[in-house]
Image (cartoon, grey):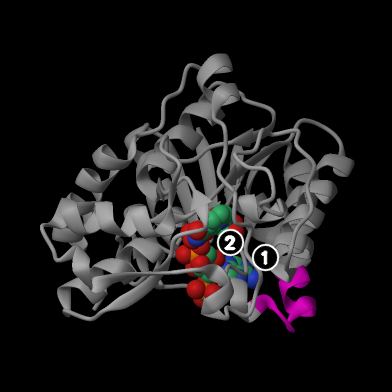
């Protein structure tokens, strides 16, 4: 396959490039800022909010698939920046949809559990959406845009992505590790439930789904559903670090700018039953995370 990856310098983007290369694909990496190295060579500059740039770059590489991992992903910064978030997360995807139609290729794009309100998780794909914040609302609008565009679509909702890769912004797993290694205490919420997802394992599953021609909306995340607090404790254990540095706190006492879904998490039945695909469980994914950290460092 020929695979164009947008957001290829980001965490999932880098893992997607690696997994597609390992699967024998020819890969074309793009990101907002060009130049950084990926396993498929230097990233080519492509701002997905520019319809003309998207059209030209996609036409010139002629992919079978566009995997869009580019997004405005800073959840708290999204509050009050509605216009920019919409521009990247919705208009950017509309530009990719147009380029995919023109080039006769398929688009895989990523959504999030933040399209749900966290009152009734773990969620199935068809459960009612009710985003609590700007980021989640932009992803729900993106889903609607993809579906109303028509044709076959592939939307994958995921959550709590973590992993190590060169030059990526800190994710929850890396942040916990950095604090533990620096002997810094941290407070972590006990009442936000979700499935921690190792980005490299997600990339493996996405490639399988593309190869099998999956269509529609899917939940793809790590197999185990735990609180953020329990995830951090499991991470401390996996790295042999002091779990007493992790202090429990309730979301209501933390004062984050954006509201979060509390009882979140996914059921993975569709992925497991229809495609017989099995995400890694928490302990196995933490083992792979350790290997990634040994290879790429912890970002400090
Ligand atoms: N992280 C999570 O926990 C999580 C959970 C659920 C779903 N997701 C979704 O999964 C996908 C991948 O997430 P991630 O954590 O890998 O994100 P990430 O590390 O933040 O990577 C996103 C990449 O997209 C780039 N980008 C931003 N705006 C762009 C634009 N206009 N044009 C081109 N590139 C642009 C970013 O560049 P800059 O760094 O320069 O901005 C970054 O390299 C996203 O769709 C995200 O919403 C993530």
Q: Is residue 217 above or below residue 48?
A: above
Q: Which mark is residue 6?
A: none
Of residues 188 and 47, the one drawn nearer to the viewer in this rendering: 188
Q: Which secondary structure dominates the residues rendered in magenta? A: helix
Residue at x 50% of width, y 36% of height? 206
Residue at x 41% of width, y 32% of height? 279
| Distance from mark 1 CB to nearest ligand 1 atom below 8 Å | yes
Q: Which residues are magenta?
A: 78-88
Of residues 123 and 247, the one drawn nearer to the viewer in this rendering: 247
Residue at x 29% of width, y 60% of height? 164
Tell me residue 112's x, y (percent).
62, 52
Residue where numbered disc 1 is placed: 48
**Seen from this angle, which residue lies furthest left?**
240
Mark 2–mark 1 Cα distance, whole angstroms, equals 8 Å
Q: Quadrant of residue 154?
A: top right
Q: Is residue 294 left or right of residue 218?
A: left
Q: Earlier in the sequence, mark 2 or mark 1?
A: 1
Q: Is residue 4 left or right of residue 150?
A: left
Disc 1 on helix, strand or loop? loop
Disc 2 on helix, strand or loop? loop
Q: Is residue 81 magenta?
A: yes
Residue where numbered disc 2 is placed: 70
Q: Is residue 79 magenta?
A: yes
């Amino acid at each position: 396959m020929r695979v164009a990856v947008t957001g290829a310098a980001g965490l999932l983007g880098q893992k997607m490039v690696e997994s597609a290369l390992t699967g024998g694909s020819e890969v074309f990496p793009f990101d907002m800022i060009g130049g950084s190295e990926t396993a498929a060579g230097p990233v080519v500059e492509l701002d997905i909010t520019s319809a003309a740039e998207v059209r030209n770059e996609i036409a010139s590489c002629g992919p079978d698939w566009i995997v869009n991992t580019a997004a405005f992903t800073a959840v708290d910064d999204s509050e009050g920046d509605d216009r920019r978030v919409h521009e990247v997360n919705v208009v950017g995807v509309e530009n990719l949809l147009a380029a995919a139609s023109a080039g006769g290729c398929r688009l895989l794009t990523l959504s999030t559990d933040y399209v749900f309100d966290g009152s009734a998780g773990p969620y199935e794909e068809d459960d009612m959406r009710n985003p609590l914040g700007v980021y989640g609302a932009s992803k729900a609008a993106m889903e609607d845009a993809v579906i109303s565009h028509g044709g076959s679509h592939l939307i994958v909702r995921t959550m709590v992505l973590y992993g190590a890769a060169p030059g990526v912004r800190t994710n929850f797993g890396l942040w916990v590790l950095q604090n533990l290694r620096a002997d810094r205490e941290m407070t972590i919420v006990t009442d936000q439930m979700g499935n921690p997802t190792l980005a490299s394992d997600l990339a493996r599953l996405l490639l399988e789904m593309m190869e099998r021609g999956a269509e529609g909306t899917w939940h793809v995340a790590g197999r185990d559903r735990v609180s953020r607090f329990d995830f951090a404790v499991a991470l401390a254990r996996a790295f042999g670090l002091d779990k007493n540095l992790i202090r429990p706190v309730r979301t209501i006492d933390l004062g984050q700018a954006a509201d979060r879904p509390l009882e979140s998490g996914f059921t993975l039945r569709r992925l497991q039953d229809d495609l017989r695909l099995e995400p890694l469980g928490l302990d196995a994914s933490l083992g792979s995370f350790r290997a990634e950290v040994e290879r790429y460092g912890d970002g400090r």
